[in-house]
Image (cartoon, helix red, strand yellow):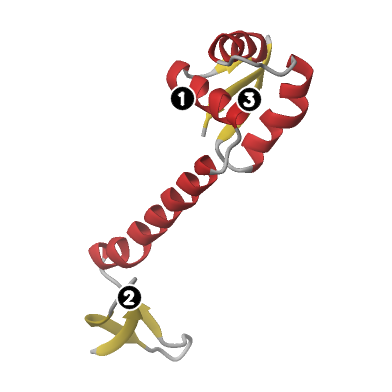
Amino acid sequence: MVGIAVIESVRSIEIKTTSSELSSQQRGGFYLRRQQHQRLVEEPVLSASEEIRQKAISKLNNHQRVVYEVLEQDGPLIQKELYERYSANNDDPVTLRYLREKHLPNLEHYGLTKTNRNGSGKEYAVS
């Protein structure tokens, strides 16, 4: 048995159920059970990803927020449909060209949306 100190968000814990294997051709390796891996690696990563996403959403300007909310509610949309719904939900909409060149690339850069090319053009969706 080997104990490993792992720092979780507030406290440190020790895993007593890990094992170290050495053979003539390998270096030491530590093996975690699947549940431990989920608790120590996967869950904090998902939690951090969600925090980053929420922070990015909170920093959106009004136009970007409306576009994001339209995509979130109505699902994947082609550019023309997205612009029509954005215009209907915004009192002072920007032009389609400005939306296409400024706001949509920024939303994708922030990791909030994704773009798929299909036969009818680009399709935008929440990622």
Residue at horizontal 77%, vertical 23%? 98
Q: Residues within 10 Å of mark 3 (few under 14, many from 20)?
A: few
Among numbered discs 1 and 3, the one appearing first in the sequence: 1
Which label was assigned to residue 9? none
Quarter-of-image position of residue 32: bottom left
| Residue at image mark 3 | 116
Q: How many marks?
A: 3
**Residue found at x 51% / y 19%:** 70
Label 2 sits on residue: 31
Q: Crowdedness of circle 1 by 10 Å Cα count: few (<14), some, many (20+)?
A: some
Label 1 secondary element: helix
Q: Amino acid at mark 1?
A: Glu
Q: Earlier in the sequence, mark 2 or mark 1?
A: 2
Mark number, residue 72 = 1
Residue at far front of view: 91
State the image coordinates of residue 57 (x, y, percent, origin top left). Answer: 51, 40
Circle 3 or circle 2, nearest the eye: 3
- Mark nearest the camera among 1 and 3 is 1
Name the amino acid, label 3. Answer: Asn
- Indicate left or right for 35 with 4 as reference: left
* Front-most of residues 8 and 83: 83
